[in-house]
Image (tube, rainbow, N blue to C red):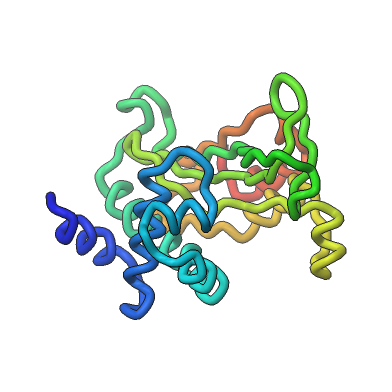
Amino acid sequence: MNYAAFRKSVLDKLTINKKVSNVCFSYLLFLMSVARKHSLEEAANFSGKNKSQFSRFLKNHSSLSETNLNNLSKKQSKILFKKCKRLQKGSLPWRVAIIVDATIQNRSSIHTENSQKFNHGNGYVIGHQWTNIVLIINEIIIPLMPIPFYSKNYCKKNKIKYKTEHEVVIEYFEQLNLYEYIGYHSPEEVVVLADSGYDDKRIENVIKDKKWH
């Protein structure tokens, strides 16, 4: 597939204004291709565009990623759920798995905005934390909207009500409507998997109220 065909295949899947489609595709291609530092300056060097184009794009169109991720996730999950039977090629009793896990986006300094020190695995790391939520259907991973974790200082500075990681996960589950993703289903067909960091009675009660396993 040549560059033009690949660009068209990507943009055809997105709901995006043609005026910003060029810079959007360049930024997506940068994120898909470069494993090193993800910054506006690196994106500009990679694409040959001015850094300000990416800065304006992210500042003025911040909701595009959320809208498109939700649309793509719902479209793919509905298609897969219609064909799926049970997890692990029929050896498990559930048809859908919801997996919850935290990811740290490393930073070199605690002074970076919203970064903080986390006890993550074998020792402490500095960075930004995201709580990732994914669906597993027919052995395919479908990402849902991740949850950002805001530090107390960041919340105070930006007048945001501070919430613990467990509180935002509870709120997320309470608002998650699986019908929008997989259509009609039995709640007993859904299993939730998380590590011991989410061993919280309040989270368990929300899952129980949803009648998930």
Q: In this orientation, which residue lies closer to the viewer: 104 or 31?
A: 31
Residue 174 lies in quadrant: bottom right
Q: Is residue 59 visible?
A: yes
Q: Is residue 183 visible?
A: no
Question: Residue at left 51%, top 70%?
Answer: 52
Q: In this orientation, which residue lies closer to the viewer: 187 or 55?
A: 55
Q: Is residue 159 left or right of residue 104?
A: right
Question: Residue at left 57%, top 44%?
Answer: 132
Residue 150 lies in quadrant: bottom right
| Residue 125 vertical position relative to residue 40 in the rendered view, above or below | above
Q: Is residue 137 left or right of residue 151?
A: left
Question: Residue at left 53%, top 38%?
Answer: 99
The spot of residue 84 in percent (x, y) is: 29, 40
Q: Quadrant of the C terminus?
A: top right
| Labels in figure, total | 0
Q: Which residue ends up furthest to the top in the rendered image?
A: 122
Residue 104 lies in quadrant: top right
The spot of residue 126 in percent (x, y) is: 74, 37
The spot of residue 142 in percent (x, y) is: 41, 46
Q: Is residue 156 left or right of residue 82?
A: right
Q: In this orientation, which residue lies closer to the viewer: 95 or 30?
A: 30
Question: Residue at left 56%, top 57%?
Answer: 176
| Residue 142 vertical position relative to residue 92 in the rendered view, above or below | below
The spot of residue 48 in percent (x, y) is: 36, 60
